[in-house]
Image: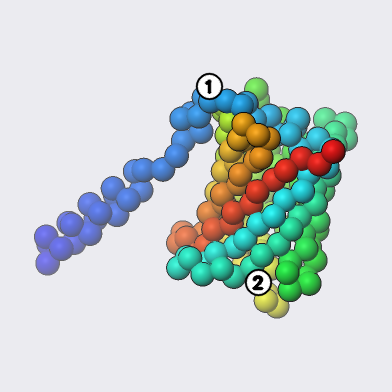
Amino acid sequence: MKRILLGLALALTLAGCGGMKIEDFKGKTPELKIEEYFLGTTRAWGIFEDRLGNLRREFAVDIEGAWVGDEFVLDERFLYTDGERERRVWRLKRTGPDAWEGRTEDAIGAAQGRAAGNAFNFGYYLNLKVGDGRWKVRFDDWMFLQSDGVLINRAYVYRWGIQIGSVTIVFKRQP
């Protein structure tokens, strides 16, 4: 029994050691500056997959980005394929040369973001609407700028520390 418990503890410890770090992308190009990429109008398309890889939702989102004083405001308007609409307005403030703090109405506390090279990592807790209720979930958002101006976003969604799904979004700036 001791061997089984020791093996399980070792497996859990090793499982938590991996993962991307924003520093891994330092120097990669093209450089992603979210305040430049999202300034103006951006269109995006996305999907949500559950933890088993089953497609659960599809959506499009129109985003308007603008400076309002010292805040960079992202006004997101979602349209899901089932007809549901949702709006989320992020207010971002720079907290360092490559660091941001963000707030939105359904977030729990402040989101923390960091940029390096072609990547941006944004972590936050959200009261996510699920059916008729709300779930407290954690998002680990990773954005990667590609050479053709397409921005790919992969977000991992957790509830009670367990990954419950992922969101994939592709952004394209609009003229």
Label 2 vs label 1, nearer the camera: 1
Q: What element carries label 2?
A: strand
Q: Which residue lies furthest to the front in this view?
A: 148
Q: Which of 54 and 2 is in front in this view?
A: 54
Q: Earlier in the sequence, mark 2 or mark 1?
A: 1
| Colouring chosen for the image of the structure | rainbow
Q: Percent from the top left, x then y, of residue 51?
A: 47, 65
Give the position of the C terminus as an image quadrant.
top right
Q: Nearer the viewer, residue 114 or 30?
A: 30
Residue designated by label 1: 27
Q: Percent from the top left, x then y, of residue 129?
A: 69, 68
Q: How crowded is mark 2: few (under 14 residues within 10 Å), some or many (20 or more)?
A: few
Viewer can see residue 105: no
- Label of residue 130 in the image: 2
Q: Percent from the top left, x then y, of residue 45?
A: 69, 55
Identity of the residue drawn at 64% across and 52% down:
169
Viewer can see residue 23: yes
Identity of the residue drawn at 62% across and 35% down:
145
Q: How crowded is mark 1: few (under 14 residues within 10 Å), some or many (20 or more)?
A: few
Q: Percent from the top left, x then y, of residue 43?
A: 77, 48
Q: What's under tag 2, amino acid-wise?
A: Val
Give the position of the N terminus as an image quadrant.
bottom left
